[in-house]
Amino acid sequence: MSEIAKECLAAFLGSAEYSRTLALQLRICELKKAGFEPDVLLLLEHPPTITLGRNGKWHNLLVSEGELEERGVRRYEVDRGGDITFHGPGQLIGYPLMRLDPGERDVHVFMWNLEESIVRLLREYGIEGGRVEKLTGVWTPAGKIAAMGIHISRWITRHGFALNVNTDLSYYDLIIPCGISGKSVASMETVLSRKIDLREVAQKYVHHFAHVYKRRTTMISERDLEENLERYSRP
């Protein structure tokens, strides 16, 4: 990794509300636009949440607002690409907040790399993950295991991926995942027939993210991340 010069701070936040982490993403991206140098990788899980991307349609939500409330599911419209998807406990969420250098400014390459980082992570667990032509995300023979959608402004990235680790897949019955009918979903747990520690998966992911994106990536605590942001924000 001698070629890697750019720094990235990776923080595992545990379980965090969607609105809170969206606000954190926006804050970090604004700081990066103002000159904050390190890229940031947020890793976490959400309470049950459904999000609709800017290309999505609410008709891909298959239940009423009342049924969502009964199951404790919140919903949001967001500015990422893609259609409707589910976030919830047992799912590793990754939000790479990166300033892309001139040589990295290709959205398709960025998405390919995001898929590749997850494919390599799954391979470490003995899971066969890959791509499906014209469809984003990472797929296994058992179904789609990771969804993704991003937003880029002034070549600074937001949003990211959702990898099913120990996810309750019955939540996907509430939607047509990513607006694609007739496709099944899978999790690492259903493929391996055992539960996997989410923090362990997050730590292993950092290694693959660093190699694929060529970032010198350091795991730090949420408190240390906040201190870094506060230090830069002070006049």
Image: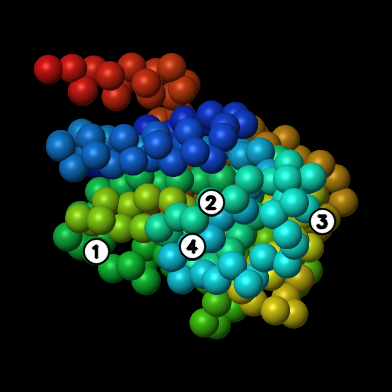
Q: Nearer the viewer, residue 149 or 138?
A: 149
Q: Give yes or no for contact between labels 2 and 1 (Cβ–Cβ under 8 Å).
A: no
User: Residue under circle 4?
Assistant: 53
Q: Nearer the viewer, residue 180 or 161?
A: 180
Q: Taking 225 as reference, is 6 left or right?
A: left
Amino acid of disc 4: Gly
Side of 224 relative to 164 (left or right): left
Q: Nearer the viewer, mark 1 or mark 4?
A: 4
Query: Eyeballing the image, is 12 above or below 155?
Result: above
189 over 46 or under it: above or below: below
Marks 2 and 3, the one that precedes in the sequence: 2
Question: Where does residue 202 sit, x and y in percent of width and height?
Answer: 58, 38
Dot in front, 3 or 1: 3
Disc sitting over residue 76 in the figure: 2
Residue 60 image point, x, y percent: 64, 70
Residue at image position (81%, 41%) is: 195
Amino acid beneath label 1 = Arg
Label 3 is placed on what type of residue? Ser
x, y (%) of residue 148?
52, 60
Q: Are marks 1 and 4 in contact (CB under 8 Å)?
A: no
Q: Amino acid at mark 2?
A: Tyr
